[in-house]
Image (spheres, helix red, strand yellow):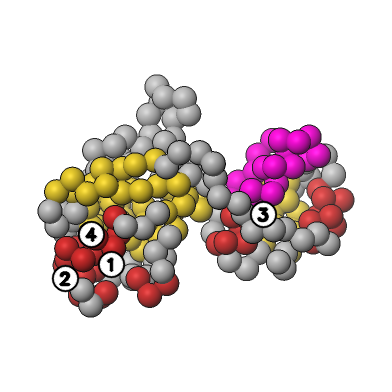
């Protein structure tokens, strides 16, 4: 794994890698080190191809250690799979089917038969970027984003699946709807999904 570590202020480090998989592996390794006590960091935040570490006392030393070390692929999470019931009724289902070259019900079957992993979170509280579909199922964003996407919308963009936790503008392709609450201030933790969470979508209606 090739890494580039960039200082961010006095106590943070942004580590760049080459892929989502490498970012996930690095994040898992850093979380492991913090749990065993060999890494002191207040925040470890993964993104598409970076991991941000904050609250470091010696970022320069850690940067040297990381760029000289090897990181194994991220192990599978032992936690249970989060299951999200979904109605495959999205307004872009037919467009996604045409892009994939299949019937709409096949989009639902392919999507529901995939086990996803939350690579990272962002965009809105509770929004996870889920990976798992093979690369040939990548879809482009909509040419014209919607000004308002309903909460619970299950959507695709590029290599990712996501669920809008609240109403917001968005340009992802909407293929379904779930009633599951992704972000709840009264819940601990408030976010249902976090990096590394395994996710399965359960069809509850015909496409």
Q: Secondary structure at mark 2?
A: loop
Q: CA distance from mark 3 to mark 4?
A: 32 Å
Q: At which x and y percent is residue 71?
A: 72, 58
Q: Nearer the viewer, mark 3 or mark 4?
A: 4
Q: Is residue 9 left or right of residue 103?
A: right
User: Which of pointers 3 and 4 lies earlier in the amino acid sequence?
Assistant: 3
Query: Which numbered disc, 2 or 3, marks the residue that appears first in the sequence?
Result: 3
Q: Which residue is mark 3?
A: 26
Q: Which residue bears the numbered disc 2?
A: 103
Relative to 80, residue 50 above or below? below
CA separation in Å, label 4 and label 2: 9 Å
Disc 2 from disc 3: Cα separation: 38 Å
Give the mark nearest the N terminus, 3 or 1.
Answer: 3
Among all residues in the image, which is located at the extreme top? 186
Which residues are the magenta region? 26-46
Q: Which residue is mark 1?
A: 142
Between the C-alphas of marks 2 and 1, the distance is: 20 Å
| Disc sitting over residue 159 in the figure | none
State the SS at label 1: loop
Q: Quadrant of residue 21?
A: bottom right
Q: Nearer the viewer, residue 153 or 170?
A: 153
Q: Nearer the viewer, residue 197 or 176?
A: 197
Image: 85 above or below 171: above
**Image point (42%, 36%), residue name:** 192
In the rendered structure, the answer to whether residue 117 lies left or right of residue 60 reads left
* Rendered image: mark on residue 108: 4
Q: Quadrant of the N terminus?
A: bottom right
Dot 4 or dot 2: first in sequence order is 2
Q: Nearer the viewer, mark 4 or mark 1?
A: 4
| Secondary element at tag 4 | helix
Q: Say if 55 sits above or below 113 in the image.
A: above
The answer to whether residue 55 of the structure is visible from this angle is no
């Amino acid at each position: 794994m090739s890494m580039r570590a960039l200082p961010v202020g006095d106590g943070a480090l942004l580590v760049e890698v080459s892929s989502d998989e490498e970012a996930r592996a690095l994040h898992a390794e850093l979380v492991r080190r913090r749990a065993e006590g060999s890494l002191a960091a207040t925040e470890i935040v993964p993104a598409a191809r970076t991991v941000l570490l904050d609250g470091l006392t010696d970022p320069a030393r850690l940067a040297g250690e990381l760029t000289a070390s090897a990181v194994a692929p991220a192990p599978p999470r032992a936690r249970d799979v989060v299951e999200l019931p979904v109605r495959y009724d999205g307004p872009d289902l037919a467009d996604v089917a045409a892009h994939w070259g299949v019937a709409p019900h096949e989009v639902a079957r392919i999507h529901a038969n995939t086990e996803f992993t939350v690579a990272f979170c962002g965009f809105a509280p509770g929004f996870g970027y889920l990976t798992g579909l093979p690369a040939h199922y990548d879809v482009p964003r909509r040419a014209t984003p919607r000004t308002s996407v309903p909460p619970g919308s299950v959507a695709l963009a590029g290599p990712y699946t996501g669920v809008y936790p609240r109403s917001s503008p968005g340009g992802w392709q909407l293929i379904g709807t779930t009633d599951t609450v992704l972000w709840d201030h009264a819940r601990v933790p408030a976010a249902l999904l976090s990096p590394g969470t395994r996710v399965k979508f359960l069809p509850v209606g015909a496409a």
